[in-house]
Image (cartoon, helix red, strand yellow):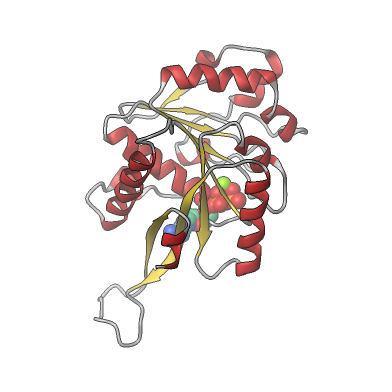
Amino acid sequence: MEKIELTAFSDPKSPISEAYRTIRTNLQFAGVDKELKIIEVTSTLPDEGKSTVIASLAVVMAQAGKKTLLMDCDFRNPTLHKIFKVRNKGLSDCIATGGNFEDYKQSLGQENLELFPAGPVAPNPSELLTSAKMKSLLAQFREAYDYVLIDTPPILPVTDAAALASRVDGVVLVIASGQDSPEAVQLSKKRLEQADAQILGCVLNKVKIGGGRYGYGRSYGYGYGYRYYYGGDDSKK
Ligand SMILES: Nc1ncnc2c1ncn2[C@@H]1O[C@H](COP(=O)(O)OP(=O)(O)OP(=O)(O)O)[C@@H](O)[C@H]1O
Ligand SMILES: [Mg+2]
């Protein structure tokens, strides 16, 4: 796997880190009137940047003093342990053995941030995610953390993200710019709604910035940026 660098971790002053802080603020406002603690991130298709986005978001949440648990529920392509370079023992082991979460959580060198890795690839991910053990873990985390940020597989290829959606407080959809057809995004939105998901908004990822032919030339050429649209109609702005 290609190595993923987290700018929010290594360079808190960069514009990318600032963009993540904007997403953080929007999520905090979205939680003013209702409990918004357990947040799932998904996307329509693979490789849109879900794991990068949720890991970065967890870092800026923790930097703001929020006790944050980053949880990898992508049993098909577990990634968060690779980003933070820790061993992959976690949720699937914990559910399979009925073990204690405390034995699996990992500190990450960032105050207020802990990781619950996915554990080894499981044959029955949707069943694990809808198990009674998973339900009790989420209830336990709700008491112990300010935010629980959950990475999941993409919606269209597999059912895992939709299966989990009704058990979390909200879902953020990552959309890689220029990668999905509008129809595919509409379909994933429909799948989430059918699963009773509370869709909080979208992160438009992998946006090319500063590369326009007539732009105000940036010496470094192409870069990547993030924009966050909170709420349904705002996305048309
Ligand atoms: N904004 C960005 N700009 C440039 N590259 C990015 C950006 N976001 C993610 N990537 C890169 O895209 C690749 C996929 O990212 P990531 O693993 O986060 O996606 P994913 O949606 O979690 O994939 P999967 O569906 O396989 O779980 C990685 O190489 C990552 O470094
Ligand atoms: Mg991923």
Report the residue that reaches farthest toward the right: 123
Q: Position of residue 236 (x, y in %)?
A: 44, 67
Report the residue that reaches farthest toward the front: 33
Instruction: Work out whether residue 34 or residue 148 is closer to the camera in this orientation and state it.
Output: 34
Instruction: Work out whether residue 6 or residue 49 is closer to the camera in this orientation and state it.
Output: 49
- Image quadrant where residue 72 sits: top right
Position of 208 with respect to 105 (left or right) is left
Q: How many marks?
A: 0
Q: Position of residue 99 (x, y in %)?
A: 62, 12
The structure residue drawn at horizontal position 30% and vertical position 50%, both measured from the top left corner, is 22
- Answer yes or no: is residue 1 visible: no
The structure residue drawn at horizontal position 52% and vertical position 59%, both measured from the top left corner, is 175
Position of 104 with respect to 124 (left or right) is left
The answer to whether residue 207 is above or below residue 104 is below
The structure residue drawn at horizontal position 69% and vertical position 54%, both measured from the top left corner, is 156
- Image quadrant where residue 226 sits: bottom left
- Answer yes or no: is residue 144 visible: yes
Q: Quadrant of the C terminus?
A: bottom left
Instruction: Work out whether residue 59 or residue 192 is closer to the camera in this orientation and state it.
Output: 192
Report the residue that reaches farthest toward the bottom: 214
Q: Position of residue 149 (x, y in %)?
A: 47, 35
Q: Position of residue 166 (x, y in %)?
A: 61, 35
Position of 7 with respect to 116 (left or right) is left
